[in-house]
Amino acid sequence: MTHQNAHDRRQRRVLIGVALLFFAPLGLAFYLYYGHGTWHPGGSVNAGELVHPARPLPSLALPLWAADGASTDPNFLKGKWTFLYVGAGHCDEACLGRLYDTRQVRIALDRDMQRVQRVFIADPGCCDAQFLHEQHPDLIVIRAGPEAAPLLALLPYRNGAAQPRVYVVDPLGNLMMSYAPDAKAKGMLQDMKRLLRLSSIG
């Protein structure tokens, strides 16, 4: 009986050890950028503004902008880090500049580039489809409309109106950071490098 009890205890220790190996990196990542009040992606300074607490975004199949009847997978915001940009009306020079910035930041991540995707929610008739295809072939462009309303309602607003901000969504589908319209691409790159280095997810 004593031998059986010792065997059971060893099995429990092994199971606990395996569980810790699996969950510890994920728990550390959450602690660092969700639960630690003094941590910022850039040490004492970061370019992005943390969304606290992080906001889980809904799983939605949203219409693709340039494809009739085609939609995203409901879980398209999960599995990768996401730069999410929301346009308003015609994509003006500032809008094009932010699309360019997110493209260059993603490219500059080099071997971690595939861990990051870019999503643009655009008004119908906003842009030149050929231009987007040629200049931003990796960009997931979604048509703004009623289907996207539950997601858009969770994005931070200021002064009662949506601002042209770049948002960061983690691989679990949580909105966790946003960038002001005047945030520099260099700062975005530094933040993302640190997040990707600290995270074992995505």
Image (cartoon, rainbow, N blue to C red):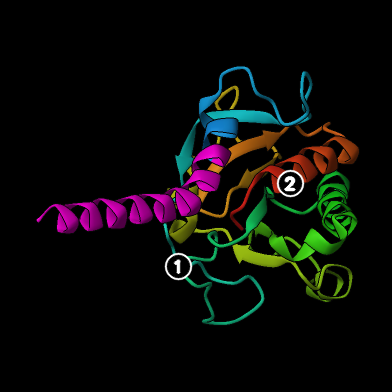
- Residue on which disc 1 sits: 74
Look at the magenta stretch and give its main secondary structure. helix
The residue depicted at 82 percent of the width and 47 percent of the height is 98
- Residue 150: give x, y in percent of width and height: 42, 49
- Residue 37: give x, y in percent of width and height: 56, 18
Left or right: 150 with respect to 185? left
SS class, disc 2: helix
The residue depicted at 24 percent of the width and 58 percent of the height is 7
Q: Amino acid at mark 1?
A: Pro
Residue bounds of the magenta highlight: 1-29
Q: Is residue 168 above or below residue 106?
A: above
Q: Amino acid at mark 2?
A: Arg
- Of the 4 image quadrants, the one containing the C terminus is bottom right
Mark number, residue 140: none
Mark number, residue 197: 2
- Of the 4 image quadrants, the one containing the N terminus is bottom left
Q: Is residue 161 visible?
A: no
Left or right: 104 with respect to 65? right
The residue depicted at 53 percent of the width and 60 percent of the height is 78
- Residue 33: give x, y in percent of width and height: 59, 33
